[in-house]
Image (cartoon, rainbow, N blue to C red):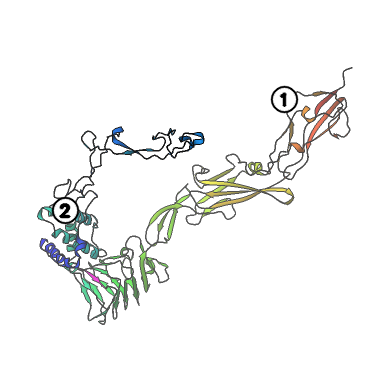
Amino acid sequence: MKRRVLSFITVLALCLNLFPAGALAADAGTDDGLCPHHPAHTDACGYISPVSERECTHSHDDGCYAEETNCIHEHTAACYPGPDGVSGTDEPALCAHVCTQDSGCVTRMLACLHEHDDACGYAEGNPGAPCTFACPICPIEDLISRLPARVSAHNMEQVQAQLSEIYALYEELTGDEQRQVDLSPCVALLDQIDGMGSAVLDGGYNLSEDENYPGTFIADVPMTFNTNGHTFTGAVSGKGAIRVTGAGKLYLIGGGYIFGKNGTGVEVESGGFLSVADPATRIKGIGYGLDIASGAEVHLSGGTYEGSTAAIRADNFDALLEDGCAYYDDSGNWLSPDDMATATKVIVKQCTDHIKECVLKKGLPTHDWTCLACGATGEEGCTFDFAQSTKGTCGSCNNEITVTVDRESLKVLAYDESVKPENGTVTVAVKDAAADLVLDTDYTVDYKTQADVGNASFTVTVTVTGINYDGIFTADYTFTKDELEKLVLEWDIVSKPVPVAVAYDGSPVEKDDLPPVIINIQTSAGVDLHDRLKYSHRAQGSSDAYTDSLPTNAGTYDVVVTLPEGPDYQAASSEPITLTVNPIDP
């Protein structure tokens, strides 16, 4: 085993010339150059830490400045003696100008002679120097960390390229550096490759062009067969293009075309092994595309198979598929294992649109499902179809759900849809459930009202939408005005006692002298109806009709208040209240 590994490493070393020198150079590592293999800087790496400049603490005093005088004064007549500044002399004997800093004639210039010393604390900064150490081990360890856990026919070429790069860098290390590298993951992968047979190590059988093979290709050891996208034709009469013996292990890769011109495409004998994963692979034969004997191990996750008798012959079609895969016809329709014995063209691919067989979960709005095509399982919410009924049925599992609406409780919505009905107006229950579903947890309810032309009736639309299930229940509930409760106006007799007495003042009684009226209604438009109230009176004990208005003259009256019918409310009237207008005291 070790000899084979060493032979493989030697072959990999021969590939070094294929890599440009720059591609094998190690990275500089982190910003400061430190890594597990260079944990501290040394003189050899040349690293110097940067040092920040320390500022000077010297403060300038008067001795640090020099003054320079440059008079900018211009003499005026006041600077000369004599009347009106004329004395017969040219000297400005009377000039009182003095050059100062304030006059602008004296300029103070910094001329500090201070030199940095220990007392001022100044220290010059240093940008430092970067670490020049380039770790040759870290890049190898990074490549090792990216290796897969296992080798398969699908990733073998990639793994071989990764191992080639790792061992190429490893050979450049010193002995001490090599002892720091853990090659056990590489050795484990080499063992896996070795277990797949020497033909795999040698690259197996590779096509560089279309090939008409003179006989049947025999795979009697573990190996890869790489078509590289080409066509491989077996032309011997009565024989297949490829036969995998009981001792053989064939990984068919490359996405090409295997054609048994006068026989089966690929035959797998009892004990043999076949793996096909590339979706571009096509296998066709006269009679059968694949002929699989009992006791053979076959793994199909991709490819197209064709045969004049049947695409595939096997005892157990389910056992051939990798997890998540299924059989399909040329139109993309699923083929069940029962159809496989006569299907002449079959495509194997991942199952994405599951064909679900569902089983309800008793008392819950969900069901379990199993895909008939690939065997995948899962759980999902039921989809209920109410079909204009209060009972919904799930078409997948026949589960049932019932929506119950308390029609009477919807009357509060007739004039105002913003009012929320009391809890219990709508209940939702799953068949055989121990308790009803919960509002705003399992479902939501929306209400909408609409009055017909003329407001003769009002309709409330109730919509129940599932949250943890699919399905929408909707129904209309219509009420006529006669069904709605009559509007009642009430006197507020708390703030003022009954009967009410006022003094005669020659003017009609004011509404404010009477108790306020309570209106137990909120209109859809939110209008205050108190301005629409009408007051009327008649003499108490009289059978005459009420007079619209409040009384003026002294006497005792019955007063009633009425509300005429509106667009979204009914007419109403209050009970009479006793009103006494007292005459003037003589």
Magenta-span inclusion, residue 224: yes
Q: Nearer the viewer, residue 167 or 330?
A: 167
- Of the numbered discs 2 and 1, the one sitting upstream in the chain is 2
What residue does disc 2 label? 182
Disc 2 to disc 1, how far (Cα)? Answer: 96 Å
- Look at 20% across and 35% down and name the residue there: 118
Q: Horizontal and vertical percent for residue 418?
A: 62, 43
Helix, strand or loop for disc 2: loop
Q: Horizontal and vertical percent for residue 435?
A: 50, 42
Eyeballing the image, is 328 above or below 477?
below
Amino acid type of the residue that numbered disc 1 sits on in the rendered structure? Ser
The boundaries of the magenta stretch are 220-232
What residue does disc 1 label? 495
Q: Quadrant of residue 55?
A: top left
Q: Horizontal and vertical percent for residue 21?
A: 19, 63
* Name of the residue lying farthest toward the front: 88
The total of numbered circles placed on residues is 2
Is any part of residue 191 visible from this angle? no
Eyeballing the image, is 510 above or below 569?
above
Look at the image and tell me in which quarter the C terminus lies: top right
